[in-house]
Image: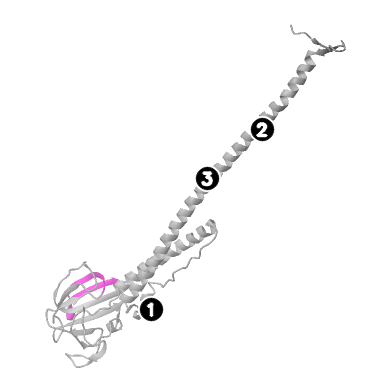
């Protein structure tokens, strides 16, 4: 059993004095424990605080990693979107320029036909300082781009459907409008132009379309009719023979038949008509001005 008190004796040899101290065990132990508790507590507190700070830093670092990853992904997606949209706008601009060059007759079509292909302007997108604003702008531009893409596709289709090349090599022997009928001598309306040429010369489709007639048809003789869409139809009469059949799809410049004099004709030529929504149109309005008529 541990004693409750200890006696400490100190003696001075020079004087012979003796000093005696009695110390209680429990208070001494309490003081020692208190003295030890201070550094131990400080150490524990420091370690706990450091651990908490480290955990907080880890959480902040994790959040920053997630945010940085999100920003990187967002930036990459927005960069790709900008690049795709810019490429799309450049492509559409180029296609519009090409279509305009390849089809100078486009602007000469009646308004009712050209209305099927509305003109659209190319939007310009300015850079912004925030992802949200840029993302919103990109969404708006993407919708606009889809509208433009649809409009350009219609314009290209109308350009392909516009009959703007001569159907055969030769010379213009009869114009569109009123003239003296070559058989009766009376004044008569001629709904086409006649291009005289040697028998058997090729006749070309003047625009892309689908053959809706390839048969003999009264005064027209051997007739080919092509529907080009947008209400545009072309007819080629008095042919000697056919190079296409009903239902065939033909491209502009493709041979569809051969010059002849079948039907009500005074010589070898092509009777060439252009119809817009069922009404005839002077083909010369859509053909290039030239001294020598050449289909190629």
User: Residue 129: x percent and y percent?
Assistant: 55, 60
Q: CA distance from mark 1 to mark 2?
A: 86 Å
Q: Which residue is mark 2?
A: 46
Q: Is residue 182 above or below residue 79?
A: below
Residue at 29% across, 72% down: 160
Q: Nearer the viewer, mark 1 or mark 2?
A: 2
* Picture coordinates of residue 231, whole percent (x, y): 32, 73
Quadrant in which the N terminus appears: top right
Rendering coords of residue 123 (x, y %): 46, 68
How packed is label 1: few (under 14 Cα within 10 Å), some, or many (20 or more)? Answer: few
Q: Secondary structure at mark 3?
A: helix
Q: Which residues, given as a range, are shown in magenta? A: 207-228
Q: Is residue 217 left or right of residue 4?
A: left
Q: Residues within 10 Å of mark 3 (few under 14, many from 20)?
A: few
Which is more toward the observer, 1 or 223?
Answer: 1
Location of residue 4 by image quarter: top right
Label for residue 111?
A: 1
As helix, strand or loop, the secondary structure at mark 1 comes to: helix
What secondary structure is the magenta-colored segment mainly?
A: strand
Q: Does residue 22 appear in this view?
A: yes
Residue under numbered circle 3: 66
Do labels 1 and 2 touch, CB within 8 Å? no
Q: Residue at x 67, y 29 (%)?
A: 43
Question: Mark 2 and mark 3: span between their CA atoms?
Answer: 30 Å
Which residue is pictured at 78% across the width and 15% down the height?
Answer: 26
> Who is closer to the viewer here, 221 or 144?
144
Q: Is residue 214 magenta?
A: yes
Camera-nearest residue between 245 and 50: 50
Q: Is residue 144 left or right of residue 295?
A: right
């Amino acid at each position: 059993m541990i004693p409750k008190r200890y006696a400490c004796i100190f003696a001075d040899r020079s004087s012979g004095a003796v000093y005696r101290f009695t110390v209680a065990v429990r208070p001494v132990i309490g003081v020692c424990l208190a003295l030890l508790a201070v550094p131990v507590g400080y150490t524990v507190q420091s370690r706990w605080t450091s651990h908490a700070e480290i955990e907080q830093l880890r959480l902040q670092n994790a959040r920053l990693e997630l945010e940085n990853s999100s920003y990187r992904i967002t930036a990459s997606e927005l960069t790709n979107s900008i690049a795709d949209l810019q490429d799309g706008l450049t492509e559409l601009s180029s296609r519009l320029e090409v279509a305009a060059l390849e089809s100078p007759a486009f602007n000469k079509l009646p308004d009712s036909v050209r209305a099927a292909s509305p003109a659209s302007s190319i939007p310009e997108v300015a850079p912004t300082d925030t992802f949200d604003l840029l993302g919103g702008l990109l969404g708006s531009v993407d919708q606009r781009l889809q509208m433009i893409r649809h409009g350009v596709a219609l314009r290209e289709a109308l350009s392909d459907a516009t009959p703007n090349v001569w159907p055969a090599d030769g010379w213009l022997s009869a114009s569109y409008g009123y003239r003296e009928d070559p058989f009766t001598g009376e004044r008569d309306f001629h709904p086409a132009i006649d291009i005289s040429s040697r028998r058997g010369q090729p006749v070309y489709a003047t625009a892309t379309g689908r053959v809706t007639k390839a048969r003999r048809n009264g005064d027209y003789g051997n007739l080919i009719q092509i529907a080009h869409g947008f209400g545009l139809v072309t007819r080629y009469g008095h042919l000697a023979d056919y190079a296409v059949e009903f239902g065939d799809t033909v491209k502009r410049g493709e041979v569809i038949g051969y010059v002849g004099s079948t039907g009500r004709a005074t010589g070898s030529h092509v009777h060439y008509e252009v119809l817009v929504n069922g009404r005839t149109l002077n083909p010369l309005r859509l053909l290039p001005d030239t001294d020598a008529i050449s289909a190629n």
